[in-house]
Amino acid sequence: MFQFMTSTKIVFGEGALASSLSAISQYGYSALLVTGEDRNRALLIIEYFNSQSIRFHHVAISSEPFIAMIEEIAVQGRKFRPEMVVAIGGGSVIDTGKALAAIIPNQGNLYDYVEVVGRDVPLKSKPIPFIAIPTTASTGAEVTKNAVLRSGQDRVKVSLRSPDMLPDLAIVDPELTYGTEPQTSGRGAMDAFTHLMEAYVCGDPNPLTDMICEEGLLRLSGAILPACLDDHPEARSDISFAAMLGGMATTNAKLGAAHGLAFALGGKLKAPHSVIAAQLAPYVMLENIHAAEQLGREDILSRYKKIAQIVTSQNDAHVEDSVIWVRAMLDKLKLPKLSTFGVCNTSFEQVAEDALRTVAIKGNPIPLNYDRLIYILSKVCPCTGAIPHPITRTFEQYRVSKTDQVSQTDRASQTDSMAAVGQRTLDNDFERKE
């Protein structure tokens, strides 16, 4: 038996924002509007608010949301008494809006309600209506039931979570992602991949999330390079769709050690969550694959192999090809390594302890103990002096799947570029355990 939940209403497609403005006024005539520092993409909403005499209080954020920041804005919000919260921006903006919609009608300290470092008390009152409009294809927060927040005093990332926090309306307009610079697009797309991958291999999958993950992985792997590097409109649409599917999957399945470690590291490094999770993903994947091999867990290995088959478009793909594909994408998209953010200066022991307290790590397909988490962190850090052994398999004829929406010219260009990347082994990144 399983259950499935998502946003009450989803509007997806090019031009979705312009065509859905009238739906916003159904939720009231006073709004807390949350954006990033650049509110240009919100101008259409502001014009609509003015034309419909909808009162609004604008909040612009410039960083990932901190618990203290949410509490401060909530005080202002209660004075304004909004009938709805509208958030248009990236994952941090949507998480901020979602948290505000939940906490404004609930009195008390935010630590009463958050997981891990708080009391994790259920919300006493239902959130006010929340409308999520993503301008990046990344977290899928427009269809999730949690908001990821930084706890400054504990130096970890935690979730405020409730089924009631699912957005009332999600407007996913791929046009809002057009023109996003390549590295921002790349880290968002790899964050979406990590959501889809971890939900697919987690310890508690279900048939519906399996279908969602496979479709998301197919669309994402085919569109990731033309979308992120060439701003290809149809590829952008596929990445937006895949990111949304990733949010649905993580809401209804579970995550794993990549996110568990990312939440623990996120409060200690000045690095985007998307980069942390994406850079951890191949190390966690390989650790899980090796553990599954040792335990004879063919059910887990078959899922990693299916991922490899989808992302490489090769039926004879090896289980470890999924890891090689991820490393190739990180390289091609030029995502910064965690060493550039000072991961080697963190206490691996503390990170491992914090990770073991997260909800995410409980979904890992194979339980990883303190020592295995330390091992993974030592592989991420190039300063540990460990002598790695190579994964010897490479792609001599590497191919990347493409959706039918991407032109044959783009197909050839992506295949040629990835063939060169796929030739490299991962000698410097992984240790092959005997």
Image: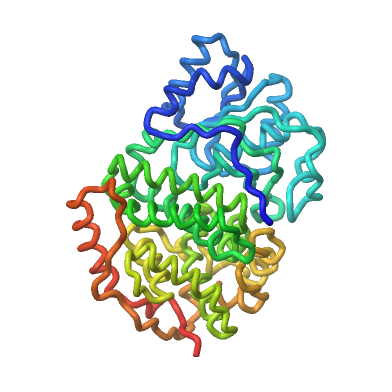
Number of labels in the image equals 0
Instruction: Return the residue nearer the eye: 253 or 211.
Output: 211
Q: Position of residue 112 (x, y in %)?
A: 80, 44
Identify the residue shown where x is 70% and y is 35%: 102
Identify the residue shown where x is 19% and y is 52%: 408
Residue projecting furthest to the bottom: 434
Instruction: Return the residue nearer the eye: 240 or 213.
Output: 213
Q: Quadrant of the N terminus?
A: bottom right
Q: Is residue 25 above or below residue 245?
A: above
Q: Position of residue 334 (x, y in %)?
A: 35, 58
**Left or right, residue 238 beside residue 421:** right
Using the rendered view, name the quadrant where residue 353 is placed: bottom right
Q: Is residue 383 above or below residue 206?
A: below
Q: Position of residue 291 (x, y in %)?
A: 57, 80
Instruction: Return the residue nearer the eye: 337 or 82.
Output: 82
Instruction: Return the residue nearer the eye: 367 or 214.
Output: 214
Residue projecting furthest to the front: 1
Using the rendered view, name the quadrant where residue 61 is placed: top right
Q: Position of residue 286 (x, y in %)?
A: 49, 75
Identify the residue shown where x is 78% and y is 50%: 118
Q: Is residue 205 above or below residue 287?
A: above
Identify the residue shown where x is 69% and y is 28%: 128
Q: How is the image coloured?
A: rainbow
Q: Is residue 60 above or below residue 159?
A: above
